[in-house]
Image: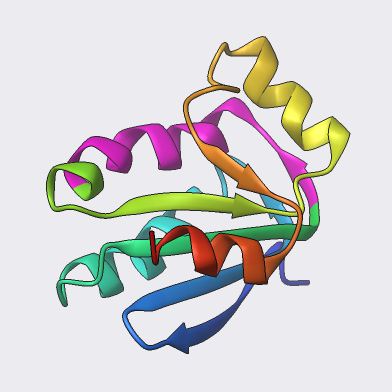
Amino acid sequence: MVLLAIDIREQVDTVVLKLKGILNGETAHIFENTLHNYTDKGIYKLIVDFEHLEFLSSSGVGCFIGNIKMIRDKGGDIRFVAVHPKIRRVFQILEFDGFFHSFESLDEALASFQG
C-alpha cells in the first residue's frame, strides 16, 4: 500500500505537487526528496495541492517549515491549494496557519506567482 503518492505537474517555472494519502514521519522523506528534486534544479515556485491528502502530522508540517526559508531566500515560495479544514487545523495548532499563502483553486495559486 502506498502511503503517499505525489502527482507532479510542471507549469512553466512553477511545479504543482498534488498529494494523496498521508504526510507524516514515515512519508516525509518522499515529499522532501520530490521537493529537493526541483529546488536543486533552481525551481523555487511550488504549489502543493492538499485536495486528496487525508492526514498531515507535525512531521509533515516540518517538511514545509524546514524548506521555506531557503525557498523564499531564492525568490520563491510554497503556496497551498484546497486545504481541508482538518489539515488547516494542524497548521493552526502549530501556529503556522498565517505563514503560508493558501488558495481555493490552482488557477488562483498560479496567478499569485505572476504579480
The quarter of the picture where the N terminus appears is bottom right
Horizontal arrangement in the rendering, residue 98 relative to residue 105 (left or right)? left
- Within the magenta stretch, is there residue 66? yes
Q: Which residues are magenta?
A: 54-70
**Which residue is depicted at the point 43% across and 41% down?**
64
**Which residue is depicted at the point 26% across and 62% down?**
44
* Relative height, residue 18 to residue 101 (above, below): below
The quarter of the picture where the C terminus appears is bottom left
User: What is the x, y in percent for residue 46?
Assistant: 42, 63
Pick whichever, 10 or 60, lies toward us. Answer: 10
User: What is the x, y in percent for residue 40?
Assistant: 16, 70
Is residue 30 visible to the viewer in this orientation of the structure?
no
- Within the magenta stretch, is there residue 81? no
User: What is the x, y in percent for residue 30?
Assistant: 47, 63
Pick whichever, 112 or 80, lies toward us. Answer: 112
Pick whichever, 105 or 93, lies toward us. Answer: 105
Is residue 101 visible to the viewer in this orientation of the structure?
yes
User: What is the x, y in percent for residue 63?
Assistant: 43, 42
**Which residue is depicted at the point 63% across and 62% down?**
108
